[in-house]
Image (cartoon, coloured by chain):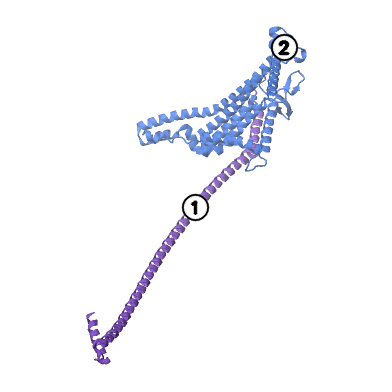
Chain colours: A purple, B blue
Amino acid sequence: MEGIGINLPLLIAFVINFAILFTLLSVFLYKPVLKMLDERQARIKESMEQAEKMRQQAARSEEEIKAHLENARKEGQAIITQATQIGERLKQEARENARRETESLIDKARREIQRERDKAVTELRKEFANIAILAAEKVIGEALDKEKHRKVIDEVLKESTALK
Amino acid sequence: MNTGCGCSIKILAWVTIILLALLLTGLIIGPLGSKLLGVEAPSFLDIPKPHVQLPPEGIFHVASFTITNTLIASWLTILVLSGLFYTCTRKMKLVPGRAQNLAEVVVETLLNFVKSVAGENHARIIFPVVATIFLYVLTNAYLALLPFFGTVGISEHNGTFVPLLRSANTDINVPLSIALVSFVFVEYWGLRALGVFRYINSFFNLGQLRNGFVSLFKGKVRPAISGIGFGFINLFVGGLEVLSHFIRIISFTFRLFGNMTAGEILLLVVSFLIPFIASIPFYGLELLVGFLQAMIFAGLTLVFGVIAMAPHAEEPAHTSQ
C-alpha cells in the first residue's frame, strides 16, 4: 500500500476535491444550462403549438370566406334569374298590349269602312231614286205626282233591301 | 494564386526539413544515439535519467498534512473547469452566444449519452455525477499534457528534482477517490430507486429461503428442502454479488491509475531516448487515452447505476411450487 502511495489523508482530500468540483459544476454548469435547455424546449414547443393554432385559424377563416363567396354567388345567380323572369314577363305583356291595340285599331278601321260603305250605298240609292224618278217623269210626263211616286220607289227599295 | 501556392509548398518543405533535422539531432545526441554511436552530447543538453515515482511527492506541509503536487494539479483542474464554465454561463440567454454554446454542447452531449443508457426517467438523477467524473478525469489527463507539468519544480538539497505539478490521475489516491464516490453513488441510487429491502433482496433473493421455511412449517418436505437449498445458494450468490460491487472499486482504481501512469512513463521514456519530435505522436496517443479513460470511468459508473436502479424479477420461487 505504501509502495504505490495510498495515503488516507490525501485520499480524503481528493474526495473533498471531488465534492467541491461536483458542487461548483452543479452551480455553474449543470443547473443553469439544464434550466436553459428546458426553458428553450418549452419555448419551442409553445411557439410550435401557437403556429399550429394560427394555421388552423387561417384555414378556418379561409373556409368562412369561401362559404361567403359561395353565398354571394348564389344570391347573384338568384337575382339574375329573377330579373330575367321579370324581363320576360314585361316583354310578354308588351307584346300582348301591342297585339290588342292593333286588333282594336283594325276593328275600328273595319267599322269605319263599313260605315263609309253604308253611307255611300245609301247616298247612291238616293241618287239612283232621284235619277229614276227624273227618268220616269220624262217618260210618263207628269202622270204621277211626286209624292206618290216617291212612295212607290221607297217600297221597291225596301223590298230590295230585304233581298239584300 | 500560383506564387502563393508555391510559397506555401516551400514553407512546408522547410518545416519538414527542420523537423527531420531536429529528429535526427535528437536521435544522434540523445541517450539512444550516444550509446549506439558513441557521440558525446554537449553538456547543456545533458538530460537527467527519468525515474519512476509512484507515490506523489510532497511540496510543502500544513501542520501534519502534506500538500502533494498531484493535489495542486487537482486544484488546478477544479479552477480551470469551474472558471471556464463560470464565464460560459455567467449571462445565460435564450439565444446562446459562443461561450454559452460551448457549455450547452458539453452538457447536452453528456446528457444525451446518459439518456441513451439510463432512459428519460433516471437520466437527470445520474447525470451530474457521471458528467463530473467525465470532466474531472478528462481535464486531469489533458492538463497533464501541458508543458509546465512535470518540468517546473523544486530541486531539493539531496539533488532530487520535485515537479510542482504532476498529472493527478497518476496518483493512486485520485482514481481511488473517484471510484469510492462512484461506488457510494451507485449504491445510493439503488437504495433510492428500490428501497432498502428490495435493494438488498435484489442481491440475495431472500424470498425463496422464506418460502422454504414456510413449507417446512406446513410440513411439506420436498418444497421445503428445495426452497431452503436454493435459498442458501441464493445467499452465496448474493455474497459474490456484494463482493463484486467492492471489487469494482479496485478495478476502477487500477484501470485509470494504470493507464495514466503508463502513459506518463511512456512519454517520459520516449522524450528521454529521443529528445525532439519523436514524442509528438505519443502526445496524440495520450489525448486519445485520456478521453477513453474518462469515457470508461463515467460510462461504467452510469451502467452500474442503471443496473442498480433496475427493478429485479420479483421472487420467481412462487412459480416453482
Estimate how packed mark 1 is, as few (under 14), some (14 to 19) or many (20 or more) residues with alpha carbons within 10 Å.
Answer: few
Is the C terminus of chain B in the top left, top right, bottom left or bottom right quadrant?
Answer: top left
**Dot 2: element:** helix
In front here: B253 or B49?
B49
Q: Residue at x 71, y 7 (%)?
A: B38
Visible in this render: residue B88?
yes
Q: In x, y percent, where is residue B178?
A: 61, 30
What is the C-alpha distance between the residues marked 1 and 2? Answer: 87 Å
Q: Report in which chain the residue with disc 1 lies.
A: A
The residue tagged 1 is A62
Quarter of the image where one finds residue B52: top right
Q: Amino acid at mark 1?
A: Glu
In this image, A146 relative to A27: left or right?
left
Instruction: Reply above or below: A75 against B39.
Output: below
In this rendering, would B252 be left or right of A60? Answer: right
Quadrant the N terminus of chain B occupies: top right
The amino acid at mark 2 is Ile
Question: Label 2 marks which chain's residue?
Answer: B
- Return the x and y of residue B157 as percentages of the image width and height: 77, 20
x, y percent for residue A94: 40, 68
Q: Are marks 1 and 2 on the same chain?
A: no
Mark 2 highlights which residue? B29
Q: Nearer the viewer, mark 1 or mark 2?
A: 1
Relative to the observer, which residue lies in front, A83 or A131? Answer: A131
Towards the viewer: B125 or A121: A121
Residue placed most toward the observer, B260 or B174: B260
Secondary structure under the numbered disc 1 in the rendered image: helix
Up the image or down, B139 lies above or below B269; here it is below
Circle 2 residues within 10 Å: few <14, some 14–19, many ≥20: many
